[in-house]
Image (cartoon, rainbow, N blue to C red):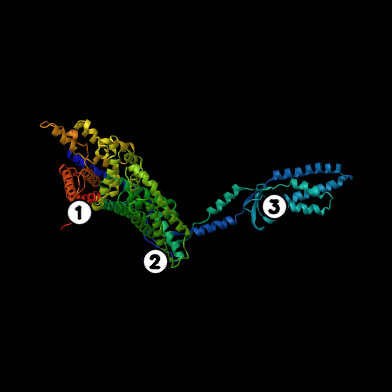
Amino acid sequence: MKSLLSKLQHNSYEILKILSFVFAVAVVVWISPRERMFKYEFRTGKPWNHKDLYAPFDFSIFKTTKQLTQEKSDILKNLKPYFQYDDESTRAGRQQLIQNFGESWSMANQHQDKVISFQDSITYLDALLAVYDQVEKGIVQLNPVIEGKPKTFQIKLIRDNEARDVNLAQLYTIKEADDYAIAYIRELKSEDSVLLFKIIDNALVQNLIFDKNKTDLLSQEMLSKISPTIGLVQKGELIISQGELVTGEKYQVLSSLKKEYEQELGNSEAWKYVHGGSLLLIMLLFFIEYLFLKVFVPDIYNNLRNLHLLLGSQIALLATAFFVFSYYPSWSYMVPYTILPVVVAAFLDRRGSLVVYLITIMILGFYAPNSFEFFYTQFSAGFVAIFSIGYLAKRWHLVKTSLFVFMAYLLVYFSMLMMQEASFSNISVHLIMMLAGSSLLILLAFPLIFIYEKMFGMITQLTLLELSNTNNELLRDLAEKAPGTFQHSMQVANLASEVLFAIGGDAFLARTGSLYHDIGKMEHPLYFVENQASGFNPHDELSYEESARIITGHVLRGVEMARKAHLPEQIIDFIRTHHGTRRVEYFYRLERKQNPGMEVDETEFLYHGPVPFSRETAVVMMADSVEAASRSLVNPDEQKINDLVELIIGSMIETYQFNNAPITLKEITISKKVLKKKLLHIHHVRIAYPD
């Protein structure tokens, strides 16, 4: 038992990496669509390249979206809307007419010279009531449901709890009612026709009110009766023969079979097969990804943080795509799939991002509509994105990648259009707009990269570009307070980047780290020789131990300043390691010389470390030491520079400063050659030519 626990503890980091992949598989299987996959690919206008297909079970032929839309449109177009007859307002209007007539007629007689007989008033009132009763049989309220309809259009008129069909020709609009009243009153040839029209016009009401609730219920009932199918295919019936052209009708039958096949889950055994197959496929692909990263990209695999970034990005894209496939399949091409390799390449490695993207697209291809077209399109665009992104050292690189991806999308789309349609007459503007949107959404990598940097504590070339700007506050302070140190840091940055270009490594990271490696000297700049311009040396007033303490302390002070300025840990690593665990040799030897025969506490003269643990930090240590030491050379020549570089780097090897760094003796030898060459140029030393 103890042996087992010991093995588990010893391999805990490896187990965590394996568990990360297991977790990724579990999540992807859980979020993946539950339908079975149809195993045949088919397109309209192309021959059926598979064997003869017979119906595996009875299934209905589903109507196309266009057919269903047309049927719904026809039903709604011929729908008879309900209108409710308003008895109460009709009676109130009639009563208002009688009251207004009496008041208006009495007032008119008071202002006229002649007196109108009672019989004439009765005649006029009867005429007005006759007009009112005629038009108030139905003055329809204006509503969009009847606007523009012909007079033969019928509505459902509800009156006294009875509904009957009525043509619009049998009804009046308010304008038609006014016109009828005017014509009728003119036939009376009365001198008071204007007054009579005013009286009836004020009494007319729109008494046929649109009943939206009943109309909606009727429309829903009629739409619900629409059958989604137009036929039935029986089990064993030949659907299509090998080599037969996939016509529109055949495509409809095949699409119906595919829909039924993917939705038909059958009994519990079918569930087991569906989920078992999905699990095995996803497990296999993630296992391939696991092996590839472990064998070919160990830099990613050996860092758990890198794995979490990669797998997290992969799961996020899969989840987004599965959601769109399930609920908005027509928008499948709007998802920015190529953002995955862009983000992964920005942080990790282009080779790793290529394989991860390929495996992700393969998983999505199982569930995407038109899986072959989908896979080929995204495969091509993804490769273009990876090759065009470079090291993402400038913001323009991402914009350029977005443009290249869109061009790749268009090229693939038009190529397939030519193969399938043999013309450009059926170009889909909607699809092109979606491809443009997907390409544009790649620019979301900007905020995503920033979020990832904060979440995972990682840096990209964009961040290094910002940090290496010498106008940054920390570097400006260094240039102002310790100008000699600033110039030294610039030279170290140039040397380190040149070495890493030669041996391989992140030259941009080393250059940026070099600029900050000595910021701790800002606190006591005059205690460092490169900043002593007047000849005064403050170390003359200190003991050698105190001097060594100040010199070694600049590393700790630099780390504190960097953390206060929120510099990334990757940059702080250069501050911590650029002296490793070496001695402050100058003051250590002076201390021994001053106290001969006495034991000197060596720890007082040692830097606190740690030693370099990356190729970049090891190179910066070499560049820093040889650049600083070369300044002390009197009349430097090729031999002196050669001896100096060999001595300093040899001392580093002897004191085990490179034991934790992945740098070989061959790479150290190349580094020495590059440093010697660059120092000769810096000190303007010409190489001696043989006689």
How far apart marks 2 and 3 lie (CA) works out to: 60 Å
User: Pointer 1: residues within 10 angstroms few (<14), some, or many (20+)?
Assistant: few
Q: Which residue is label 2 attached to?
A: 48
Residue 274 lies, in percent from the top left, at: 35, 53
Circle 1: residue type: Ile
Q: Quadrant of residue 581?
A: top left
Q: Residue at x 58, y 49 (%)?
A: 216
Above or below residue 121? Residue 563 is above
**CA distance separating discs 1 and 3:** 107 Å
Question: Which residue was labeled with disc 1?
Answer: 687
Whether residue 482 can be seen here: yes
Q: Nearer the viewer, residue 459 or 13?
A: 459
Q: Residue 573: where, in percent of width, then height?
A: 27, 41
Question: Which residue is label 3 attached to?
Answer: 173
Picture residue at 60% right of the left edge, 48% below the top = 212
Quadrant into which the C terminus falls = bottom left
Of label 2 and label 3, which has the lower sequence position? Answer: 2
Please, which residue is most extreme toward the right here?
114
Amino acid type, label 2 = Trp
The kind of residue on which mark 3 rests is: Thr
- x%, y% of residue 294? 25, 50
SS type, badge 3: loop
Question: Disc 2, disc 3: CB below 8 Å?
Answer: no
